[in-house]
């Protein structure tokens, strides 16, 4: 197996030189729809979708699953409150928000909300969580000290996204079906005003440098720019088709807008609210995340199963990284320079590693062990049992799997002990990878021939 070892070493060096790469994947049992990071306990919380909805808790030091917190069907990403070390998770099927203790990873409270809670926003100034309720057309205000609802604020039709204005202590609520943004005064918990937007406003971003709120209008191919002090519309910026996500680059005073149907990201100057450039991405960009450590923007390409990495200074694409099926959300771990990617239709969370020097900080990669699987196979791949290739799965701290990957590192199929039918696969070079809790235990090069 000397050839296989050489190939793997070369691939590792190339990945390191590029600055960003897929380091590992964490098996969580179902797809994930949202993430949040707990810096106090160095944990990642992932919204698990599918037959067993809830929240998976991951140790970010080892990238292993700690536990699974059973809740109900969730709609939006969990929201972490550092003031009380608690995670808030909306459950739209029971009209509630579940409160999870960040140390014990157990549900400590369930807060009743309006109908169809869909989005959360933390106001650290008054230590309250704001919850947008899509069907009841209102916003529930939760006191994080008592974990009780203290107010219900009327909004427009279909509240679907929230953001907080730190300078004026306001919360903005995008109303998808109402084509408006409701502005909430956090001192009084009352609706201050209603701002008209384009059609189907679906995401919000607050620019603290210029005290502006950006609203992506999915149905109008525009972004509405709102003055944070006066609540007046400053301008409307043309974007690509179906703008779906926004994020702020504070280093370069830019706002990025992912356009789902145009396969682009529109870059907006925060000072002038003018378009600087348009960046090509993978298929169906749907989520954005800014990396302050290296001044990069990460874009999840829903339809391309990739992440596009954009340089924040030059707005050039640095790399496109293959991840799981339907990437849809991010959470960053700044100390280890890791970016976690939620994959909606893939049973793993992808972990991206980043280093501007080509040598990532933190835990070194696990050296794979090369095994004795035959190099050349035809029609059937015989997978032996034993510790080299564990296949049993669980939701606990020990999860294991064995995959067949193509030359680009993409999962082709999951392997089982014994005979695996590979007759439908194209001829070429593949890799068998086995792991437990994200740690690679064995890698083997396989050449499939007809």
Image: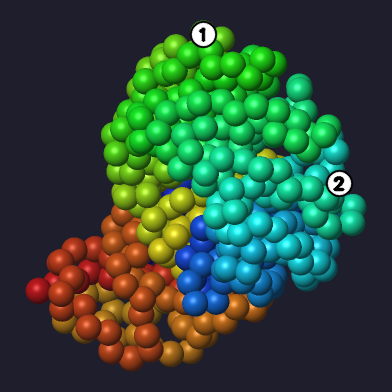
**Furthest residue toward right:** 145
**Place of residue 306 in the rendered image (x, y in percent of width and height, measured from the top left):** 37, 48
Label 2 and label 1: CA atoms lie apart by 35 Å
**Furthest residue toward top:** 272
**Residue ID at (82%, 68%):** 108
**Place of residue 118 in the rendered image (x, y in percent of width and height, measured from the top left):** 58, 53
Compared across the picture, whether 46 is left or right of 146 comes to left
Whether residue 70 appears in this view of the structure is yes
The residue to which callout 1 is attached is 272
Q: Earlier in the sequence, mark 2 or mark 1?
A: 2
**Furthest residue toward left:** 450
Compared across the picture, whether 281 is left or right of 196 comes to left
The residue to which callout 2 is attached is 83
Of the pair 118 and 273, the residue shown nearer to us: 118
Q: Quadrant of the N terminus?
A: bottom left
Q: Quadrant of residue 374?
A: bottom left
**Residue ID at (48%, 38%):** 178
Question: SS for tag 1?
Answer: loop
**Place of residue 197 in the rendered image (x, y in percent of width and height, measured from the top left):** 48, 27
- Relative to 245, does residue 408 appear above or below in the rendering? below
């Amino acid at each position: 197996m000397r050839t296989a070892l050489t190939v793997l070493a070369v691939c590792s060096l190339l990945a390191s030189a590029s600055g960003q790469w897929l380091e590992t994947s964490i098996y969580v049992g179902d797809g994930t729809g949202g993430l949040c990071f707990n810096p106090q306990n160095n944990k990642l919380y992932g919204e698990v979708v599918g037959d067993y909805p809830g929240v998976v808790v991951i140790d970010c030091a080892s990238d292993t699953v700690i536990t699974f917190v059973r809740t109900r069907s969730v709609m939006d990403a969990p929201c972490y409150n550092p003031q009380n070390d608690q995670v808030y998770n909306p459950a739209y099927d029971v009209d509630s928000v579940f409160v999870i203790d960040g140390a014990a990873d157990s549900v400590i409270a369930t807060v009743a909300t309006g109908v169809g809670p869909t989005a959360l926003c933390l106001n650290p100034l008054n230590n309250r969580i704001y919850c947008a309720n899509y069907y009841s057309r209102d916003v529930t205000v939760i006191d994080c000290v008592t974990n009780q609802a203290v107010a219900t604020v009327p909004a427009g039709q279909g509240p679907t996204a929230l953001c907080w204005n730190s300078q004026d202590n306001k919360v903005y609520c995008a109303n998808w079906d109402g084509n408006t943004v409701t502005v909430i005064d956090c001192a009084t918990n009352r609706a201050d005003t209603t701002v008209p937007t384009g059609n189907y406003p679906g995401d919000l971003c607050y620019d603290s440098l210029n005290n502006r709120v950006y609203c992506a209008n999915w149905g109008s191919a525009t972004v509405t720019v709102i003055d944070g002090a006066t609540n007046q519309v400053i301008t409307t910026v043309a974007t690509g088709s179906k703008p779906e996500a926004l994020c702020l680059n504070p280093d370069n005073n830019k706002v990025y807008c992912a356009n789902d149907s145009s396969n682009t990201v529109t870059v907006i100057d925060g000072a002038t609210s003018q378009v600087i450039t348009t960046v090509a991405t993978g298929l169906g960009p749907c989520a954005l995340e800014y990396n302050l450590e290296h001044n990069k923007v990460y874009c999840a390409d829903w339809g391309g199963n990739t992440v596009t990495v954009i340089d924040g200074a030059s707005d050039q694409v640095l790399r496109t990284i293959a991840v799981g099926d339907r990437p849809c959300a991010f959470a960053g771990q700044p100390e280890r320079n890791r970016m976690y990617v939620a994959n909606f239709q893939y049973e793993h969370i992808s972990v991206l590693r980043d280093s501007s020097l080509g040598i990532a900080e933190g835990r070194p990669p696990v050296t794979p062990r090369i095994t004795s699987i035959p190099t050349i196979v035809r029609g059937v791949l015989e997978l032996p049992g034993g510790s080299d290739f564990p296949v049993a799965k669980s939701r606990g701290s020990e999860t294991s799997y064995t995959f067949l990957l193509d030359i680009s590192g993409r999962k082709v199929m999951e392997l089982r002990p014994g005979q695996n039918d590979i007759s439908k696969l194209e001829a070429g070079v593949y890799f068998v990878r086995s792991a437990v809790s994200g740690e690679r235990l064995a890698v083997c090069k396989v050449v499939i021939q007809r």
